[in-house]
Image: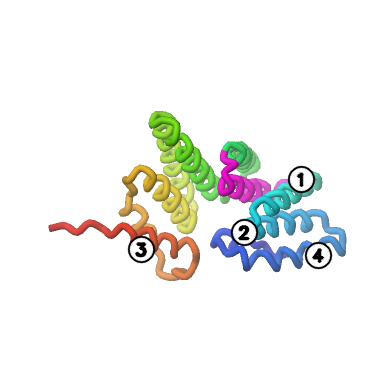
Amino acid sequence: MHVSAQPYQLLGEPSLVYEPAKDALALADEYGFAVWRAHGLIERGWALAELGSPQDGIEMMKKGLAEYEATGAKLRSPYFLGLLADQLGKTGRVVEGLTVITDAITLAQNTGEGYGLPELHRIKLFLKSRLSQSAKLLSDSPALETVSQARACFAETLETSKQQGARWRQLKAALSVYRLEMQYGRPDRAQLAEMYSSFTEGHETADLKEAKALLDAVPSRSTD
């Protein structure tokens, strides 16, 4: 009945998620499918947040997660928790987001849903980078410690995604660490450039567009 919106979510295309999720939610309500109703709430909430209503979207996602948990279902729970953690980070609720992503990673490891671990670690990296941004305002020491932790998280993300052949997750991780390093004026352009050049298609997608814009903003150093 319900086609997963996960591919469009990973590509950062909320407009392609919103209407199908809305339709799935209506059908689930009509026929009493509790699991699909929860899916619809989570996916529609994510799209709503991405389209400019983050607080409403987060509340809808939380409602969907609560309903999903009430059904006793576990499959895809780590992925859904990751979506929530990501949105919490984007709205500045970083500590709350880190709690959620830690739960998501633990659950994925316990249930064997290892396919989603690279994306969960990528979100954890994003949250760590946001935390380092806040810490930098206080003192260099906490910021540097957080950066070190974020880079370790990035290394773990790359290792897992390489094992799975998940190049898109590697790109997302590279983008996250590049943004983090930009805060300190030392982004590793070569690393992001290598990931970007490995793609021969899909250059109209949000992540590749962002990678190109970042690379264009900092030209490679020519050698004399």
Q: Who comes first in sequence, dot 4 or dot 1? A: 4
Query: Which of the two discs, 4 and 3, sits closer to the camera?
Result: 4
Given residues 131 and 175, the one toward you in this image is 131
Mark 4: secondary structure:
helix
- The answer to whether residue 194 is magenta is no
Residue drawn at 36 percent across, 63 percent down: 197
Q: Return the residue at label 1.
A: 66
Q: How is the image coloured?
A: rainbow
- Which residue occupies the extreme right position in the image? 31
* Dominant secondary structure of the residues highlighted in magenta in the image: helix
Q: Return the residue at label 2.
A: 52
Distance of label 1 from label 2 (alpha carbons): 23 Å
Query: Which of the two discs, 3 and 2, sits closer to the camera?
Result: 2
Q: Who comes first in sequence, dot 1 or dot 3? A: 1
Distance of label 4 from label 2 (alpha carbons): 22 Å
- How crowded pointer 1 is (Cα within 10 Å; few <14, some 14-19, many 20+) is rated as few
Residue drawn at 50 percent across, 38 percent down: 131
Mark 1: secondary structure:
helix
